[in-house]
Amino acid sequence: MRTLANILWHFPFFGFLTAFYTFLIGIFFTITVIGAPIGLGLIQHSKFLLSPFSKKMVSDSGANNEKSFIWKIMEVIAFLLYLPLGILASIITVLQILFLCITVVGIPVAIVLAKSLSTYFNPVGKICVNN
């Protein structure tokens, strides 16, 4: 069932393009030094978008990753800089979810967007893991 849902996500709704664009935006943020935490989170989100019904996005604080003090400061600064864009992206995603739930065929895509809503709001410190 997960495989069928992943196929439905990719071909009628072009989920692979969404993953590709998210990856490119993540690369752009990673090239800038201060945006690296955002970029790494968006790259993980693009990995999630390749098979959204087989993976999930979680915070990396539960993975017991040791981070340096400088990296933690960069994460806070990056989140504060990304906050207006994150709020806008979350509002747009909620509207997309509402419109997709109108049709039966759009419900799987709405589920994918709902699963990744917190990542759209704050990609800093998120990683993609298998279900």
Image (spheres, rainbow, N blue to C red):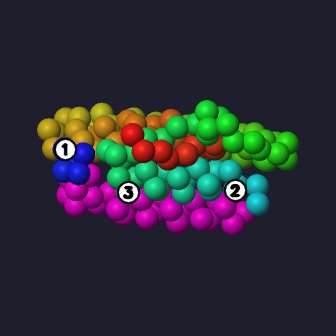
Of marks 3 and 1, the one in the foreground: 1
Instruction: Look at the image and tell me in which quarter the N terminus lies.
Output: top left
Q: Secondary structure at mark 2?
A: helix
The earlier-in-sequence mark between 3 and 1 is: 1
Q: Which mark is residue 1?
A: 1
Of marks 1 and 2, the one in the foreground: 1
Question: In the picture provided, is 75 more to the left or to the right than 85?
Answer: right
The earlier-in-sequence mark between 1 and 2 is: 1
Question: Which residues are drawn in magenta?
Answer: 6-32
Q: Which residue shows up at 46% across the image and 63% down it? A: 21
The earlier-in-sequence mark between 2 and 3 is: 2
- In which quadrant of the rendered view does residue 105 lie? top left
Is 109 within the magenta?
no
**Residue 77 in view here:** no
Question: x and y percent of residue 70 in the render?
Answer: 85, 47
Question: In the picture provided, is 76 more to the left or to the right than 26?
Answer: right
Vertical side of 93 occupied by 14: above or below: below
Is 8 within the magenta?
yes
What's the magenta bit mostly, secondary-structure-wise? helix
Question: x and y percent of residue 62 in the render?
Answer: 61, 33
| Residue under label 3 | 50
Vertical side of 31 occupied by 34: above or below: above
Between the C-alphas of marks 2 and 3, the distance is 21 Å
| Residue under label 2 | 36
Between the C-alphas of marks 3 and 1, the distance is 16 Å
The residue positioned farthest toward the right in the image shown: 69
* Residue type, label 2: Ala
